[in-house]
Image (cartoon, coloured by chain):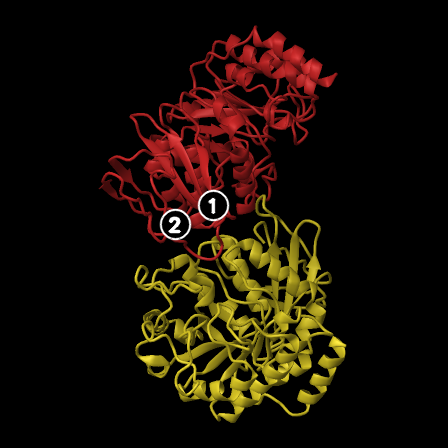
Chain colours: A red, B yellow
Amino acid sequence: MHVAVLLFAFALTGTTLALDNGLMRTPPMGWLAWERYRCDIDCENDPKNCISENLFMDMADRLAEDGWKELGYVYVNIDDCWSSKQRDDQGRLQPDPKRFPGGIKKLAHYLHNRGLKLGIYGDMGKLTCMAYPGTPLDKIELDAQTFADWEVDMLKYDGCYSNAMEQELGYPLMSKALNATGRPIGYSCSWPAYQGGLPPKVNYTQLGEICNLWRNYGDIQDSWDSVLNIVDWFFENQDALTPAAGPGRWNDPDMLIIGDFGLSMEQSRSQMALWAIMAAPLFISNDLRTISSGAQSILRNEMAISINQDALGIQGRRIVKEKSGIEVFWRPLSKNASALLFFSRRTDMPYRYTTSLSKLSYTAGSYKVCVYRLRRDVYRVSTWFTRGERVNFGKQG
Amino acid sequence: MHVAVLLFAFALTGTTLALDNGLMRTPPMGWLAWERYRCDIDCENDPKNCISENLFMDMADRLAEDGWKELGYVYVNIDDCWSSKQRDDQGRLQPDPKRFPGGIKKLAHYLHNRGLKLGIYGDMGKLTCMAYPGTPLDKIELDAQTFADWEVDMLKYDGCYSNAMEQELGYPLMSKALNATGRPIGYSCSWPAYQGGLPPKVNYTQLGEICNLWRNYGDIQDSWDSVLNIVDWFFENQDALTPAAGPGRWNDPDMLIIGDFGLSMEQSRSQMALWAIMAAPLFISNDLRTISSGAQSILRNEMAISINQDALGIQGRRIVKEKSGIEVFWRPLSKNASALLFFSRRTDMPYRYTTSLSKLSYTAGSYKVCVYRLRRDVYRVSTWFTRGERVNFGKQG
């Protein structure tokens, strides 16, 4: 019965909607508050870190002044806990007046003046996940227009406090409503994460037509275990997921936690490399005012970013999974190039891994190889491997 | 039957042996090869990192020249895979001639000339864990004498390839044999780890009489999960373990993995602080030639080291375990001082934790407080809390 309803809804909505906002032809990049700042609204005790316009302006300053913007990190995205607990007299969402005294539109201007974009958060349901006012079906058009009036550039539309049937209606409806405002607003849908992330419950064809990106799976936490759990899920289900991705439509394994408290430098490099292979949105969630130079250098790595942002927009796959704990990932790139990632899950020490072109499904031939080493001493090597030569990636591969 | 044999052996050996070498009145500190370098004997491909005299001399140079020695890190300890696969003509252990062409005695002199000490590895059994020649019962006196002849300062005596009864005899016998050489040799016993680590199988009274330190639990791996697993085990069993520790006799939760690949800076600070509270031996196992300044500053933290090295030698305990993931550890120190450690297992963000003197079992009064912050921005505060004042350790406690 439940499935029948879903199929019906798919059929209904699939014909009436298509996302055609021209946005996010490569995975969006920017900063998103949630993982690092959660619902910290205690501005009295924690004025520098509470969810407030000051926090977002501080991050905007850092993105604009410290060279992040030029690398592509242009979104500054508000997450939950920004709003007042009540809508205004006219039923519109409004920011908490103490924490956002200038209002969202002024904040958007602050960002736009610096060449940045503003993202905001809503929830397809009665309440947001942290129990602020949601955007249920009857408020979608109003709230979409409010966001457009505020000159917001992106919306993350969460799914707490709604049921599957409401979501079936609400996510396409918000897509339509955003388009109807005439303002290009990137649209991030949490819908598939609430559906378990996989077909047949999730219709990725439809998602690609209505959303620019979507969260397929649970929230990332500040730990390596969480990163590995996400990576496992995405690559175990790569056959279902990778076809869904492409320019303007991205699977979103959630934020980068590089620069926070839970990852070593090597683990940070691994997350950056894996997110590049996955063609994942790159949303930093840390304190850009105090981030270490080590974490910065990883987030700023131009090879990783260029792979992530490749114009073809094909999501990469895991192609080798060794008993030794070594895994190899591959992503086809434009200009007849491709990216290979050699990843070690070992917890003993660097491991010597030897492989061959044929094992990696490359034909014999001459290749120009650029190496970005994940473990220690980041460096690049450009060299030519002659025909049929075995490619040995060395001790710290 | 098995237990009866053990009890008999205890009774037999308990009366005949006592470790009285005067060593390690505070937990030993130094460098130990295993966690970082394992059994890497591939000197052809990996000359800088293979288990060889060059590696130990390199580490000795760093300890002596970079100021580690002055902080107390004086042992340079060889682990498994140092020896030839065969004993020599006279039945003595001998180092692999290719990797230790100068021999162990010369290496010991190299260290002694720099104010350092040499540790070596043996195994109470037919073979070491990596299948090099072990030191079974009939070789104990010979090998103890060989180590003394080489002017070795410490022995880690592992327990692979032996049964419980052999271990019951062998560990005390090696203690006696080391003492009989006349050379003070610190004695690290892996015995309790092979017995499950807990009474009644483990007799900690006897261990304190025959060993300077002992491994109670499994090997540490290069991951935060491994650190937490070890911490959990030690503090869940603190009632059995803490009474065993004292000057000259230490529980050993295994090496510090700070400076390797698996810990973030905050996790590294946590391991250092937890090992200080535990009165644990501080054996670094990383590449001191390339260690980051961040990891160095943690391993060199003088407050953590001074707590670890406190003359009373009382092992600390966990005194609070909150549902929020905050735990508090406490260690009594000399000069009427004590150490408190506030530890967060959370993976979301820094957490505001408020507590009181009474909850921490401190009486109302005036205390001089030094704070070493674990998360970010390491700093120290010295201040006086007046009578009855609530101690609030702040947002990033």
Please give the residue where the numbered disc 2 appears in the rendered image. Answer: A353
Compared with B293, A262 (above or below) is: above
Given the image, what chain letter belongs to the residue carrying mark 1? Answer: A
> SS at mark 2?
loop
Q: Amino acid at mark 1?
A: Glu
> SS at mark 1?
loop
Nearer to the camera, B314 or B360? B314
Identified at 48% across, 61% down, the residue is: B257
Q: Which mark is residue A322?
A: 1
Can the viewer see residue A259? yes
Q: Position of residue B85 (x, y in %)?
A: 42, 74
Answer left or right for B201 relative to A178.
Answer: right
Compared with B207, B54 (above or below) is: above
Q: Quadrant of residue A365?
A: top left
Answer left or right for A261 relative to B4.
Answer: left
Nearer to the camera, A130 or A110? A130
Nearer to the camera, B309 or A199? A199
Q: Which mark is residue B98?
A: none
Nearer to the camera, A88 or B133? B133
Going from N to C along the chain, the mark reached first, 2 or 1, is: 1
Given the image, what chain letter belongs to the residue carrying mark 2? Answer: A
Distance in Å between CA atoms under marks 2 and 1: 10 Å
On-image quarter of the N terminus of chain B: bottom right
Compared with B319, B60 (above or below) is: below
Q: Amino acid at mark 2?
A: Tyr
Can the viewer see residue A66? no
Task: Tell me, yes or no, whether the two marked residues, 2 and 1, touch with CB atoms within 8 Å.
Answer: yes
Q: Position of residue A198 (x, y in %)?
A: 60, 26
Q: Quadrant of residue B114?
A: bottom left
Identified at 46% across, 50% down, the residue is: A264
Q: Residues within 10 Å of mark 1 (few under 14, many from 20)?
A: few
On-image quarter of the C terminus of chain B: bottom right
